[in-house]
Amino acid sequence: MKLKIALFGIAKEIVGSSSLDLDTPDQQSVADLMRQLQTQYPALRELTSLAIAVNSDYATDDYQLQERDEIALIPPVSGG
């Protein structure tokens, strides 16, 4: 299945783009997606916290992705 992923903050800098198109196997979970991304972009492993949102809601690792899902990688945000 084809997934389109929006990237923010340091994740965007690591990948070098604000969005990413990926071909993934069917029955892909959020955890599977993270493993695939960390394999393709090893610097993502260094992030202590990285949330994945699916269709505007934070997703758990076992959430099963669908081809039309809106996916976003959201790194920790600091500021004040």
Image (cartoon, rainbow, N blue to C red):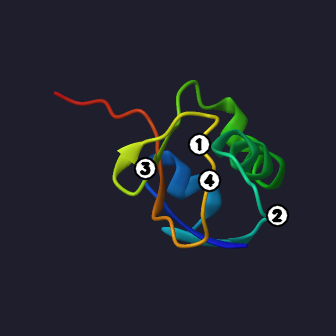
On screen, residue 69 versus residue 20, left or right, reads left
Mark 1 lies on residue: 63
Q: Which mark is residue 25?
A: 2
Three-letter code for the amino acid on which mark 3 is drawn: Gly
Three-letter code for the amino acid on which mark 2 is drawn: Pro
Q: CA distance from mark 3 to mark 1?
A: 23 Å
Mark 4 lies on residue: 14
Residue, x 71% and y 34% (percent of image)? 45
Sort mark 1 into few (<14), some (14-19) or many (20+) by Cα contacts within 10 Å.
some
Three-letter code for the amino acid on which mark 1 is drawn: Tyr
Residue, x 30% and y 30% (percent of image)? 78
Q: Is there a contact, CB below 8 Å, between mark 3 and mark 4?
A: no
User: Residue 51 at what x, y percent from top left?
Assistant: 49, 37
Mark 3 falls on what kind of element? helix
Mark 3 vs mark 2: give the one in front.
2
Q: Earlier in the sequence, mark 3 or mark 4?
A: 3
Residue, x 63% and y 49% (percent of image)? 64
Q: CA distance from mark 1 to mark 4?
A: 24 Å
Q: Which mark is residue 9?
A: 3
Q: CA distance from mark 3 to mark 4?
A: 9 Å
User: Residue 8 at what x, y percent from top left?
Assistant: 43, 54
Q: Is there a contact, CB below 8 Å, between mark 2 and mark 1?
A: no
| Quarter residue 74 falls in | top left
78 lies above or below 37:
above
Q: Is there a contact, CB below 8 Å, between mark 3 and mark 1?
A: no
Mark 1 falls on what kind of element? loop
